[in-house]
Amino acid sequence: MTKHIACGDVVEGCAFMASASTEEALLKQVSQHAAQAHGVKEVTPELAAKVKAAIQTR
């Protein structure tokens, strides 16, 4: 099963999508995207919870 996320489910209007074989690998991609595209320097527990809630397994 592959893990998927659409950033737009967390940040309205963002078209970034990512997928990976593990949640850890997916979260690494999301963290890099958040830093580059949204200027996120630190992932708060609240943001982490929103991101994890948006992850889908297919």
Image (tube, rainbow, N blue to C red):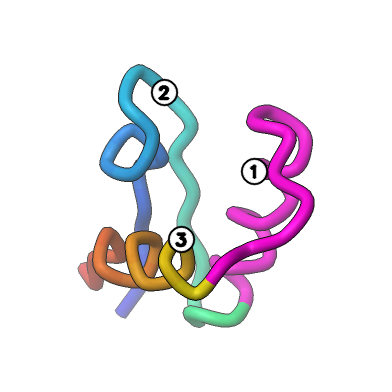
Instruction: Please give the name of the residue rendered at 57% of the width and 67% of the height, measured from the top-left corner.
Output: 44
Q: Which residue is mark 3?
A: 47
- The percent coordinates of residue 22 (x first, y second) are 50, 81
Residue on which disc 1 sits: 34
- Marks 3 and 1 sit apart, C-alpha to C-alpha, by 11 Å
- In percent of width and height, residue 39 lies at 73, 34
Asked whether the beta carbons under mark 1 and mark 2 sit within 8 Å of each other, the answer is no
Q: Amino acid at mark 3?
A: Leu
Q: Residue 15 — which label?
A: 2
Q: Is residue 7 left or right of residue 39?
A: left
Query: Which residue appears farthest toward the top when viewing the image?
Result: 13
Q: Is residue 7 above or below residue 18?
A: above
Q: Identify the element where label 3 is drawn.
A: helix
> Can you say whether 32 is above or below 24 in the image?
above
Query: Would residue 28 appear left or right of 5 to someone viewing this image?
Result: right
Q: Classify residue 2 as left or right of residue 54.
A: right
Asked if marks 3 and 1 touch (Cβ < 8 Å), the reply is yes
Residue lying at 64% horizontally and 31% vertically, measured from the top left:
38
Q: Is residue 36 left or right of residue 58?
A: right
